[in-house]
């Protein structure tokens, strides 16, 4: 292995926009992040759930529930017996 080809790895303090700090190892001198586990909604339990049912209702309204209904009298797809 060649000497001095890898960057120096050292302990770095990570600083979040919320004010939280923690240490980790990195080749960078400093790390600044916008969101960390202390302020992210998923980890804090303040997560909002998106109304997925509204998307389904809009799809049903647009296609009238007939999108997946097959044609009546259409032959079945050939398959292995």
Image (cartoon, rainbow, N blue to C red):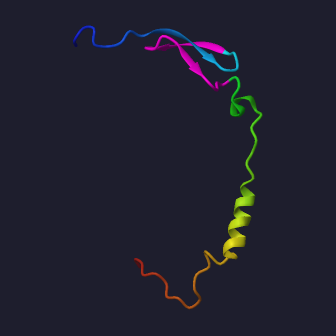
Q: How many marks?
A: 0
Q: Which residues are magenta?
A: 21-37
Split into 4 quadrants, where in the image is the N terminus? top left
* In the rendered image, the vertical position of residue 60 relative to residue 6, given as above or below: below
Where is residue 32? Give x, y as percent: 57, 18
Compared across the picture, whether 57 is left or right of 2 comes to right
Split into 4 quadrants, where in the image is the C terminus? bottom left
- Magenta stretch holds residue 77: no
* In the rendered image, the vertical position of residue 64 relative to residue 43, given as above or below: below
Compared across the picture, whether 33 is left or right of 57 comes to left
Query: What residue is at 63 percent from the left and 25 percent from the top?
Result: 34
Which quarter of the figure has residue 27? top left
Where is residue 41? Give x, y as percent: 72, 33
- Magenta stretch holds residue 33: yes
Query: What residue is at 70 percent from the left and 63 percent from the top?
Result: 56
Which quarter of the figure has residue 15? top right
Front-lying residue, 46 or 79 = 46
Query: What residue is at 64 percent from the left and 24 percent from the top?
Result: 36
Query: What residue is at 54 percent from the left and 16 percent from the top?
Result: 31
Where is residue 25? Give x, y as percent: 49, 13
Question: Farthest residue toward the left?
Answer: 2
């Amino acid at each position: 292995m060649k000497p001095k080809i890898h960057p120096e790895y050292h302990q770095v303090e990570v600083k979040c926009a919320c004010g939280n700090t923690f240490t980790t190892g990195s080749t960078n001198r400093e790390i600044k992040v916008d969101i960390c586990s202390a302020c992210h909604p998923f980890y804090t339990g303040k997560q909002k759930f998106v109304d997925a049912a509204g998307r389904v209702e809009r799809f049903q309204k647009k296609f009238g529930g007939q999108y997946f209904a097959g044609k009546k009298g259409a032959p079945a797809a050939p398959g292995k017996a």
